[in-house]
């Protein structure tokens, strides 16, 4: 009985996987076609659970407004919280406001500040993550949870391994990020030597919108604006 059950389950998985390829390809094609037209943008990440009265919601909105005032667009995950704040700042600033929404059973829903023609829905996290990495000219990472950390460390890994071009990675909120970065330096670098000292140069920690803009502008005075691979 165990053998029969396992064989049946395996056959079903193979069939489902084969058909899923077409849906995955469709998400990539749709994403590439739309994202290739948006122009230079900066992605803003952070918790979906952050409320509008939170200081980091307000700061994310200021950062997004400042970014679009200086010619960049804004990309977020399209949902509530920090994502909404980023889209709201871009919208109120009259700039490009992109939302890459993921279909989830909880928390996630489109926020109302995304440009009507720039809201893209995804079923697959990995397809959505490719869009962020390929079309962002920088990552602005606000306080968040596991999803925020996932986006952060994937970007660092891809730059570290030279799979994509280098771009600014900016952590906002010294009080939130300093403990993590202290651990990265003391444990990953100094104690176990699992990273190189130069890897820390990929990351900046700031506390206001002007510092974010200074880092972006300093980087792109020396580098061209373009997709990352």
Image: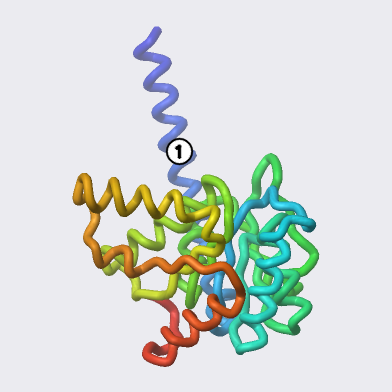
Q: Quadrant of the N terminus?
A: top left
Residue at point 61%, 88% (across, down): 70
Q: Is 106 drawn above or below residue 156 in the view shown? A: above
At a point 56% along the width and 47% down the height, the residue shown is: 145
Q: Residues within 10 Å of mark 1 (few under 14, many from 20)?
A: few
Placement of 44 over or under 52, stated as above or below:
below
Question: To which residue does mark 1 refer?
Answer: 15
Against 123, residue 89 (above or below) is below
Front residue of 74 and 31:
74
Q: Quadrant of residue 168?
A: bottom left
Question: Total of numbered circles in the picture?
Answer: 1
- Residue 34 shows in the view: yes
What x and y, as percent, mark residue 223?
38, 88
Q: Position of residue 106 (x, y in %)?
A: 70, 41
> What x and y, as percent, mark residue 213?
55, 81
**Coordinates of residue 46 in the picture (x, y in percent):** 60, 57
**Residue 185 picture quarter:** bottom left
Residue at disc 1, secondary structure: helix
* Quarter the C terminus occupies: bottom left
């Amino acid at each position: 009985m165990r053998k029969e059950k396992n064989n049946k389950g395996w056959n079903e998985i193979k069939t489902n996987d084969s058909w899923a390829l077409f849906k995955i390809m469709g998400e990539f094609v749709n994403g590439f076609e739309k994202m290739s037209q948006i122009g230079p943008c900066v992605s803003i990440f952070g918790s979906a659970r952050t409320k509008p009265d939170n200081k980091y919601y307000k700061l994310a909105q200021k950062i997004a407004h400042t970014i679009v005032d200086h010619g960049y667009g804004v990309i977020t995950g399209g949902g509530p919280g920090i994502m909404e704040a980023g889209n709201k700042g871009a919208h109120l600033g009259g700039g490009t406001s992109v939302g890459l929404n993921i279909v989830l059973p909880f928390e996630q829903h489109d926020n109302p500040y995304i440009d009507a023609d720039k809201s893209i829905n995804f079923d697959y996290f990995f397809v959505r993550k490719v869009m962020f990495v390929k079309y962002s000219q920088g990552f602005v990472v606000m306080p968040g949870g596991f999803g925020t950390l996932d986006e952060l460390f994937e970007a660092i890994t891809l730059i570290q391994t030279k799979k994509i071009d280098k771009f600014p990675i900016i952590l906002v909120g010294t009080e939130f990020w300093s403990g993590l970065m202290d651990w990265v330096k003391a444990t990953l670098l100094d104690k176990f030597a699992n990273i190189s000292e130069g890897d820390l140069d990929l990351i900046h920690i700031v506390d206001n919108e002007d510092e974010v803009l200074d880092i972006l502008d300093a980087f792109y005075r020396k580098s061209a604006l373009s997709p990352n691979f």
